[in-house]
Amino acid sequence: MIVTFGEAMIRLTPPDHRRLVQAYTLDVEIGGAELNTAVGIAQLGHPVRWVSRLLDAPMGHLIANRTQEAGVDTRFIQWTSTGRVGVYYLEVGASPRPSRIFYDRAESAIAQIQPGMLPWSEIFRDQRYFYVTGITAALSKGAAEAVLEALKAARQAGLTTVLDPNYRSKLWSVEDAAAWLQQAIHHVDVLVSNPEDIERFFNVKASEVEAGARETATRYSLKAVALTLRETPSVWRNTISALVFADGTSYHGPTVEVEIVDRLGTGDAFVSGLFHGMIQNNWQRAVDYGVACAAIKHTIQGDLPWLELSEVDDLLQGGGMRIRR
Amino acid sequence: MIVTFGEAMIRLTPPDHRRLVQAYTLDVEIGGAELNTAVGIAQLGHPVRWVSRLLDAPMGHLIANRTQEAGVDTRFIQWTSTGRVGVYYLEVGASPRPSRIFYDRAESAIAQIQPGMLPWSEIFRDQRYFYVTGITAALSKGAAEAVLEALKAARQAGLTTVLDPNYRSKLWSVEDAAAWLQQAIHHVDVLVSNPEDIERFFNVKASEVEAGARETATRYSLKAVALTLRETPSVWRNTISALVFADGTSYHGPTVEVEIVDRLGTGDAFVSGLFHGMIQNNWQRAVDYGVACAAIKHTIQGDLPWLELSEVDDLLQGGGMRIRR
Amino acid sequence: MIVTFGEAMIRLTPPDHRRLVQAYTLDVEIGGAELNTAVGIAQLGHPVRWVSRLLDAPMGHLIANRTQEAGVDTRFIQWTSTGRVGVYYLEVGASPRPSRIFYDRAESAIAQIQPGMLPWSEIFRDQRYFYVTGITAALSKGAAEAVLEALKAARQAGLTTVLDPNYRSKLWSVEDAAAWLQQAIHHVDVLVSNPEDIERFFNVKASEVEAGARETATRYSLKAVALTLRETPSVWRNTISALVFADGTSYHGPTVEVEIVDRLGTGDAFVSGLFHGMIQNNWQRAVDYGVACAAIKHTIQGDLPWLELSEVDDLLQGGGMRIRR
Amino acid sequence: MIVTFGEAMIRLTPPDHRRLVQAYTLDVEIGGAELNTAVGIAQLGHPVRWVSRLLDAPMGHLIANRTQEAGVDTRFIQWTSTGRVGVYYLEVGASPRPSRIFYDRAESAIAQIQPGMLPWSEIFRDQRYFYVTGITAALSKGAAEAVLEALKAARQAGLTTVLDPNYRSKLWSVEDAAAWLQQAIHHVDVLVSNPEDIERFFNVKASEVEAGARETATRYSLKAVALTLRETPSVWRNTISALVFADGTSYHGPTVEVEIVDRLGTGDAFVSGLFHGMIQNNWQRAVDYGVACAAIKHTIQGDLPWLELSEVDDLLQGGGMRIRR
Amino acid sequence: MIVTFGEAMIRLTPPDHRRLVQAYTLDVEIGGAELNTAVGIAQLGHPVRWVSRLLDAPMGHLIANRTQEAGVDTRFIQWTSTGRVGVYYLEVGASPRPSRIFYDRAESAIAQIQPGMLPWSEIFRDQRYFYVTGITAALSKGAAEAVLEALKAARQAGLTTVLDPNYRSKLWSVEDAAAWLQQAIHHVDVLVSNPEDIERFFNVKASEVEAGARETATRYSLKAVALTLRETPSVWRNTISALVFADGTSYHGPTVEVEIVDRLGTGDAFVSGLFHGMIQNNWQRAVDYGVACAAIKHTIQGDLPWLELSEVDDLLQGGGMRIRR
Amino acid sequence: MIVTFGEAMIRLTPPDHRRLVQAYTLDVEIGGAELNTAVGIAQLGHPVRWVSRLLDAPMGHLIANRTQEAGVDTRFIQWTSTGRVGVYYLEVGASPRPSRIFYDRAESAIAQIQPGMLPWSEIFRDQRYFYVTGITAALSKGAAEAVLEALKAARQAGLTTVLDPNYRSKLWSVEDAAAWLQQAIHHVDVLVSNPEDIERFFNVKASEVEAGARETATRYSLKAVALTLRETPSVWRNTISALVFADGTSYHGPTVEVEIVDRLGTGDAFVSGLFHGMIQNNWQRAVDYGVACAAIKHTIQGDLPWLELSEVDDLLQGGGMRIRR
């Protein structure tokens, strides 16, 4: 029903808040924006397919296997004999030391992609949604073009397209990102972002968030704009919320205070929950489940949102913090 | 001096807040309401005996060995060749994801108990107190009858009987629990509970906690009623307190804010501290040590309260949070 | 192409050769005879489907997820709300202390199966082989009948049926096993066993292994009989081999000395390799790959044979023990 | 029934054959010659009491608790407010690098003992055997005298006394050890040693082991002399055996090849098995169980022999190396 | 440029907030007040030398190696064949259970020091600062004298001397400490302390902190007095700050709320940051970097401040708590 | 005294013989041929300097820090802002599954080197030996030229040059390697290799090893040729030896059977021991210590040879396999 497309890396994290220079073991997780979202969608019970390119070596198979473990369809992973499997190192912080990520992702198999390499019409057959982020486009020139190719093919095949710009300054400049987004936005139905990024890339002032969402939607004729909101009083405790502007209406999600086990992939989990509502054509449910999935993801180790639908429901119904026996 | 009677299980916990589906190792602890209380009593320096039935296999001996490790007398464990050693799985949460427990305890050796199987008069010889919870009664029909048998035998042997209903909805219905409790309460001297349960089982309104304790004590001619109180603003931070109604007086324990390492067994640790005061016939001390033991238990891994009397004293004297060197 | 049917349990192993009574953490693996074989088949590159019944709880999903991780089709797992997820504890030995297994598998979801519960005609559609072991039949009366039902349905659907009696004395008596096998053997095309078991159940003297295989095949009109052979000079070092009698000919596999990381599931891995040859209608290849897969499995942690086809090839071509860079 | 007396230390071992300079975690075990023997006796099912002095701090309680865990009576541990809890570091080797031990045991609570400190007549009431090693005597002058005091008190109370010289060159010189042993031997009934030590201390040539045992027994009017024998072809594989000379007869134990998980405490486990036979007044059984317990101990992590009587029986009956299910 | 002098111990910490009696593994760190400060100085980019005495055994080399790892010059470590390597055990708490430290440091190689043993004039050649704490002086009589010797030699060689009294009640009495400090203060240029200690040892009322610093500086003709300030509302969350009085002026550092990963060594990290400013003759920078280094140290496992200068800068510039990618 | 030059990578190893696809944690080590040799030299007590290029990020500093930890001079590491820190994954095998290495080392900082980048004359000032392997040359064209540059500069500065071709087929073809070696050999004094490589690259038949060494030495006017010899009967047990041809004489090292904890870096440790003898101008000692260091390295976790000189001596004097207390 849903197709996502992007990179996945092996994540290596020193345990127990250790720094990398103090690491004698590293915890192994996999992660990637669109992969994370796909896993959340699968956990919520919907069919989902993740498309990527991976090196045919144990490091690549580790990623594919664990994607399958989470119930995501991997049949359209393209296996290569060249390119790397990217790695990223995470140092988990505590106030006043923020967490840090060190990427070692250059020259991955998917960064070597060129338009025409993937069979999009076959990939999109009988599917309803396509999701991709700006990270995939930022990997290389070829990747930027391949994402455009995919967005167009998805639209042509009748899919609803969803894009999160998800800006990463290590991968491309604001200028390059903005230029690509100005092209891409015309093939997009639903935009997922945050106030900073819509200001940065679409020049929509974020001072008044709701108006910003409305203006962005209107200017680019989008079906919907979803914006996530976050306050960061400390490294171990954040407050999150979101709003969706769609059909001329603003839908507000709940505001949730979170105790943070793993901050990574929480934005991607938001998108998983958003799809849960979108599939049911219910924008209020979309923003509610988006916030609830993102909130719960903060409490789950690794980038992948190992959610259960029943606990998301429970949270939205105010189930409370007591032990469930 | 004190006898407790009940089930113990092997507890299996994925480390580092992982979910069960993410578990590649499990931490091994043992736990059981009456066992936990017995361990706390032993750590506070009092002789205590734990009675149970266990399968004669390494899983059963693991439980008995670690009970001995904590200084509890295990000579009245009845070893069996049938029945299982129950297991429970714990997922440790973080706000807004509550912790979860999955029990796999059916058909344990103690659930197969029948009245007449245990030599109560021998067990109670030269003892002063008997403690049991509703969990033991809930394990099976035979267990419910065996607990009644034990309560009667204890009274007959001159012991003071203490009961915590400790309702578990997975084990029996409210109706079955209430029916059993209405029988049992007549063989009980001291009731340990919480506002929800005295409302649920004894139909005593909990809106005014102190009055509830008084009414329960009066109605059932109890020596004392102890009620524990908890606020749960987040998964990692709770506030606890308690009161005891005895001798026509209400005794209030301190209110303590806790940072939670392990939430399990904190109610059982309360009872350990309560006994510390009861033994000295001092109800104020009972409620104070009950709250202090429960508070410290929140900071200790596993179900067992590995307390030291001196640190409980230190807490009650306002020792503060600085490092002890 | 291949369907296997049986139980899977969570395996809990104290690390570093510890005994259970010394365990403070347990390594988590999943295992089950037919599941193990299915995983090996998938790793060798063939489509394979594992059929089972599992409790709809995290313990059940852990099993299903990791089965998917290994590339096995799980769509015909039947999810239940009753029954347990079985557990088994493994103590890894060293000479002269043999390894030990303690099963806690009674009342699992699959032990509660009855004939008619699983949609065999749908399961077998477009499949070529069906594999099951006597362990599944031994779980309960219902399971014994369900396996017979499945064998008949498989034959009717045109599949080749393969059976390994795999006797477990904790599950049933030799008499009960023999009685069931005398029924089952008439619906079997290929028998996988060892000299002890063909003597025990089919009364075929194992003193001369090759003749035993021949006699068994002839007596029951089997397409093939495969027998595995093992010498156990120490706990950490074994020697294994096998032979297949088929088409009136004996095919001998290589004899391989193994350094043992994990002894479990090695017989099941043999069957995986056997299928690799059977699929190609090449009995010599079947016995060779069977032995090679079993040999390599001894070096892999857990019950699941995380093999690579290229390394099995390499072993059969005498690649040697030097590091592969 | 049996009393043992001596030091116990916390053992710290870098995992996975790491050297100390490579250690980022250390495995925690407890060990001490007479403690190890006591634990083995308890595991074989006999009542046993371990006497020592320990610092009243968590490091001391860790030792006492784990001694209780193994079923050993700890009531005669004398708690002190001065002295240390000794530590020893173990580096586990592999051929050609032998294992190494670094002791940090000076000034332990038991090294500060003086004669008169322990209530021997109370300790020995209703007991049958007393076991001590030369290590305890070697700890300090006071300890040497206290051991002599204990041996005399034991004899006076009607106990059979058993001594293993167990020479440690880091603790005392050969001369000091010999001088002490020449005093002590006159209060000893059963001597446990090895060919090197009876040559070194009693000047009995070990070239012919059986004759050496006989001569030692005769010269000192001993009830029995037990000698353990070991071949060390590699660090991971040894061959062990033993003989006992008693009642004018030589009793030979089996010769067992062992795969080594943990070499420490194997001589102490021999003495545990020896007691199992001595209690039954059966010297053949004593040497057989001695060798079998020692052999199995090589496969068990830590110094403590977590044996089961049934597996010792099984080994002596030639049970073989196959998995026990 | 900077020389520090003192003891280092091996620190052993049960993981995951476990108590010592619950420890089956211990995390290994090294720590010592002056060593910690030296490491922080090295991480900030300045040449620094740590002087000590260590036993020539793997436990001693572990300390020296890890000191080198952090970039500290170890050439003036004096290797001994007698004395111990001290150990300390840390139990990490949670409210309301404070963290606890159990020292086992008596008779370490450095406690056996006597004046004249170390070549101070060689050690101080071409160096600018000397730092030592009262802990070193408290180790033994010889150590107290050796520190005085070192302070005098440093002054003579033209170095600026910095002292933190760092009172440890387990090592000496307040009277002994005060007597020594009254001698030492006359050889000190910069005093680092806290309000409690300047009241305790110099009889300067701490009720008004700024005035206390001023009075202490004036009375003893110190170049500067630095005082650290801490609030301890819970075990996992503290608030810290500091002030420096120098040149007739008070310099206030920022107030920082910290989430605590490891509380140890935070005062020592303050001194590292202080040196960063002192070297630049900038007292405002000294107090700012002192507080920032101390704050970040709370988030770093172990005693050693594995800081990066750029992140200290970032904190002082208000960089915020968001992930750094 | 000795300078080595080359790459170092972070090594990531799944623990407990796990495969990469089964890895949930990875053990972190550092390794690199010339680094490993340098560490061994430092452990044997000789001054040694390792020259490399590293990315100025925590992954690079991890390598430099741990090199310092082992006592190696790192002042000539060149820090870069481009290029990667290479990684390699190790799967530890067991017979019949050989160990496997997966390199991810392309585009490391040192692979980007060009001649002229490193200050060789400064690096070589006051040094006696220069050691490099063919691996460094194989990293890139620039690296191949830089190694030649270094060899020439070393000779010019009066150093003795030592080269191990150390062929890695993943890095370059036999042809490319041979071409480079034919150039390099003219700047080499001592060649370290094995029979396969001298046949492969210098066309010297290895059938008669001693003659091969002699012929190679003569043909290229080398001071010495050292050849290592290995038999690989299983993955966990090898037999090693070596010979040196120098001064017209063959020097044979001992033959040692090893139990393998970690096979990596054993050839590099041989070179460390070789230097120990070379420095003393004693070729017999060189080959003896080479073999002994290599043998002991097989028992040490990681690539780095954490040796002690005294244990190497002990091995060469036939110390035996008993525990050292």
Image (cartoon, coloured by chain):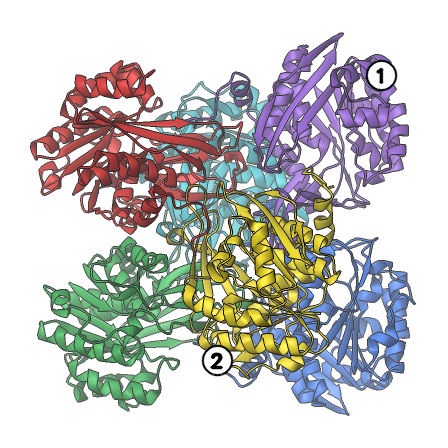
Chain colours: A yellow, B purple, C blue, D cyan, E red, F green
Q: Chain of mark 2?
A: C
Q: Is residue A73 visible?
A: yes
Under mark 1, the amino acid is: Gln
Disc ID at residue C320: 2
Instruction: Look at the numbered disc 2 and give the secondary structure of its residue.
Output: loop
Mark 1, other Cα within 10 Å: few <14 / some 14–19 / many ≥20: few
Q: Residue at x 83, y 23 (%)?
A: B151
Under mark 2, the amino acid is: Gly
Q: Quadrant of residue E227?
A: top left
Nearer the observer, A155 or D118: A155
Q: Residue at x 63, y 67 (%)?
A: A189
Q: Give the image location of residue D192, x and y in percent.
A: 49, 42
Disc ID at residue B26: none
Mark 2, other Cα within 10 Å: few <14 / some 14–19 / many ≥20: some
Q: Are marks 1 and 2 on the same chain?
A: no
Q: Quadrant of residue E230?
A: top left
Q: Chain of mark 1?
A: B
Position of residue C22 in the picture relative to residue E26 (left or right) = right
Position of residue E50 in the picture relative to residue E197 (left or right) = left
Nearer the observer, A224 or F8: A224
Position of residue D177 in the picture relative to residue A283 (left or right) = left
Eyeballing the image, is D219 above or below B217? below
Distance from disc 1 to disc 2, alpha carbons, whole Å, reads 77 Å
Nearer the observer, C259 or C162: C162
Eyeballing the image, is B154 above or below A298? above
| Quadrant, the C terminus of chain C | bottom left
Instruction: Look at the numbered disc 1 and give the secondary structure of its residue.
Output: helix
Q: Which residue, given by chain and number where applicable, does mark 1 sit on? A: B156
Nearer the observer, E213 or B179: E213
Q: Give the image location of residue E4, x and y in percent.
A: 21, 37
